[in-house]
Amino acid sequence: MFKFIARRLLETIPVLLIIITGSFFLMHAAPGGPFDSERRVTPEIQRNLEAHYGLNKPLHRQYLDYLGRLVLHGDFGPSFKYSNRTVNELIGESLPVSLRLGMYGMIIALVIGVTAGIIASLRPNTATDYVPMTLAMTGICLPTFVLGPLLVLLFAMKLKWFNPSGWYDPTDAVLPSLTLGIYYAAYLARLTRGGMLEVLSQDYIRTARAKGASEWRVVLKHALRGGLLPVVSFLGPALAGIISGSFVVESIFQIPGLGRYFVTAAFNRDYTMVMGTVIFFAVLIVAFNLLVDVVQVWLNPRLRFQ
Amino acid sequence: MLELEAVKQAKALESATPETAEAGSSLWRDAWHRLLKNKLSVVGGVIVIIVTLLCAFAGVIAPDPNSQDLALYASAPSHAHWFGTDTLGRDLFARVLFGGRISLAVGMVATLVALCIGVVYGTISGYYGGNVDAVMMRIVDIIYALPFTIFVILLSVFFNNDETRARINHVIHATGLKFSLGSEFNIVLLFAAIGAVEWLTMARIVRGQVRSLRKMDFVEAAEALGIRPQRIIFRHMIPNVLGPIIVYTTLTIPSVMLLEAFLSFLGLGVQPPNASWGVLIGEGAKSMEEFPWLLTYPGLALSITLFSFNFLGDGLRDALDPRASKD
């Protein structure tokens, strides 16, 4: 197990290096400097600004400086658009908001998705299978940016249960989390159903039933552990998806989270902010994938020998 | 004896013309029948064809999507304007059809790029095996670990602007060609770039198939006959992986279309006055309280199309590859 984790950790180094290098050079090759859209400044001020941000040095020098600061101090540098703010400050401010939203979304996805999947798998090809699975298919085909406005239209504007946007009240989290979670709930329902169906037909389930274990015990104790394997392996991509979903959801509901900052930065060509958030998200996703792999090996001992 | 049989088969396949080879194998006819039995995917396929035709012939069916008539400020759906009009008095039906054109085209361009790279890459990796395969698949694994959507937004910042297009035009002119790319090419460039990252799954699928084909008797026999690797790949391998390739292509188109809509909704994709379904949904979401049809019609168009592509893809998978499970 230790060797496995160590090897996976080593493998993440080239991935992160590629991400940092790729995003650095892509952003520096992108047309237009960070100060182009500002008021016209005299060449002298322009030079001073560039010197201040180190943009007058040769590119490889800038790259090594950036890499050095990032690796040694975790420093993403100053934002080009929010003057006097660093990218670290902006991430630090907006991350808790996004974390809360993402967590709620994930919980909704897991609770609704796994429950619906188990119910559907118990009596395959009957109404209790078709109804949740048709709903799931609809959920998968409704993108967040259609579902979100529809939920606002229905629950905020017609029924007036919630505020249409903002992030002040505790109830303001309901609609965004639902928007974020429903797609993954639908996907997880399908995965759970598939996984459970496969496990429920195995010999050891028949043995469990034969020795007189109650149906609840058979399903929740014996089958679920194996049946959830595909769900666990999907959690890595699900996190990546929830992060990109948060870009849309935070834009629709005007939530001051990291996703909205990232999109605004991409829109405004705030290169350091874009780069910083990309690297930050990448580290997050890579770390989470590592965690998912460890959990998977723990759940399924057969993987240890591969 | 078995070997000889295989050699004979390979020789027969070598000498056969493509048509007879296909008529001889009943795989395609079987698959066709299986597909027709699956009602949902037939419906999906028909809807895909109808939507594609409607969008392709949008110029004939619908009025000009950009002609503004402020007297028609956001009028509700009616006989004259089936889907209503938007806040600039533009006919929404026309805008949905012309938007669909861009959405579908973008989906197909990116998928085509992904298809070409993925198939070639996967085939080479699977066919040569050994160290070549190990290195090539390692590269795929590394790119796979990149956070995809985030990377796409990064690409959109780079590709989706006029300066990058101007630079490419500069290169085109330098080579002596006499044409330049217009503003609608920003998005095409972007999606060619996206296709260049989308190919990973395709490469993996093709490689897996080719690897298992590699050990089959008819391939060994073809090698024993001294046929060049390129010929073996194109004549014996790729036709046999065509099934999974078709299935995966059908499933990639909607996922790329979704990506385009996602970017356009955020304002990072198709730029006005060009419109795609994502742009229309984004515009509709802004004024849905007063004019809900501006959101619902483009939303429905996108959802129904994605729905149909997915059902068609699922049906094709069941028809062409009965062994593959659904999830």
Image (cartoon, grey):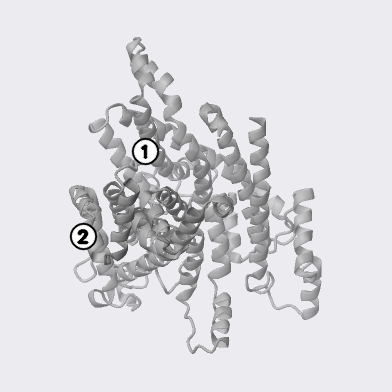
Furthest residue toward front: B1
Residue B325 tag number: none
Q: Which residue is mark 2?
A: B23
Q: Residue at x 46, y 71 (%)?
A: B188
Is A294 placed above or below B186 here?
above
- Tell me the amino acid under the disc marked 2: Ala
**How dense is the environment of label 1, judged by Cα within 10 Å: few (below 14), some, or many (20 and up)?**
many
Q: Residue at x 59, y 36 (%)?
A: A291
The front one of A32 and A175 is A32
Q: Residue at x 74, y 77 (%)?
A: A41
Q: CA distance from mark 2 to mark 1?
A: 37 Å
Is A221 placed above or below B210 here?
above
The front one of A33 and A45 is A33
The front one of A31 and A287 is A287
| Eye-nearest disc, 2 or 1 | 2
Give how far across and how far down residue A131 sits, in percent. Answer: 27, 36
**For numbered disc 1, what is the local secondary structure?**
helix
Quadrant of the rendered image containing residue A110: top left
Give how far across and how far down residue B281 sits, in percent. Answer: 39, 60
Q: Which residue is mark 1?
A: A190
The front one of A304 and B239 is B239
Q: Residue at x 37, y 41 (%)?
A: B327
Whether residue A192 appears in this view of the structure is yes
A88 on left or right of A65: left
Give how far across and how far down residue A270 sits, in percent. Answer: 65, 63
